[in-house]
Image (cartoon, helix red, strand yellow):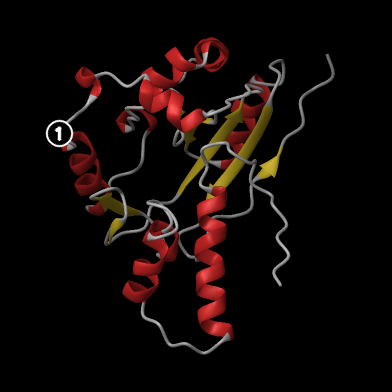
Amino acid sequence: RITLVKRIPQSAGLGGGSSDAAAALMGLNELWGLGLTEEELAERARSLGADVPFFLYRGIALGTGRGDRIEPLPRDVSAWFVLYVPPIPMRSKTARIFGALRPSEYTSGARTLELAERLGSGEALRSEALYNGLLGPAMRAFRGLRDAVHDLQVATRRPWTLSGAGPTLFVVVSSEAEAEHVARELRGLSGRVLAAPSEPALTRSGSPRAIPPAPA
């Protein structure tokens, strides 16, 4: 029997369910003394979801194939993120977004490979270098998401990126103080704002810390 306390917003494009599945696999492997290797665990993880294997590894990594073939990068990346979860109901999210994907929006993956190489060589992570090909289809499938992106850009004058299939949007900042500053700029918006550190010395990111909106 497993009791799960969810702290990551559900169906938000943050990999919460997939990381729960990976954690369960690792925990049971240790609890039952199975002695499965990471690759053996990864094979089982692939049967649960394409992005589940990613969460078996620590730090930043490159996913190829369906996203389930994981190559950890040689360097850790330390950064702060501000996440905004807009109050947008996204029923049948995956089917609608991939149904809205146009052939012209497929890419060679060269941009991702270049980013992985740069991060692996020690470059800092910057919002301007990030790209998610699902942003356009997601905005077409869910009209409120386009408005959310616009409101964030107007409020912060920064480039925001879609996390997974959304609706969460995020921006990279350089410090805790900057994260708190950006979060304060969003207090007039409805939705949930999170400021989260990525700690390379830890096996997992620090727990997201909710910053409540200011009273209207």
Q: Is residue 58 visible?
A: no
Q: Is residue 69 above or below residue 2?
A: above
Residue at the spot x=19%, y=43% of the render? Answer: 113
Percent of width and height locating residue 105: 24, 21
| Along the line of sight, the residue nearer the viewer: 163 or 124 | 163
What residue is pinned by disc 1? 108
Near mark 1 (Cα within 10 A), the count class, few <14, some 14-19 or many ≥20, is few
In the picture, residue 148 is in which quadrant?
A: top right
Position of the C terminus, as image quadrant, is: top right
Q: Is residue 186 above or below residue 3?
A: above
Q: Secondary structure at mark 1?
A: loop
Question: Is 139 displayed left or right of 155 in the figure?
Answer: left
Amino acid type of disc 1? Ser
Residue at the spot x=24%, y=50% of the render? Answer: 64
| Along the line of sight, the residue nearer the viewer: 178 or 156 | 156
Q: Is residue 189 visible?
A: yes
In the picture, residue 184 is in which quadrant?
A: top right
Question: Is 127 displayed left or right of 173 in the figure?
Answer: left
Q: Is residue 62 above or below residue 33?
A: above
Residue at the spot x=68%, y=16% of the render? Answer: 189
Percent of width and height locating residue 186: 65, 21
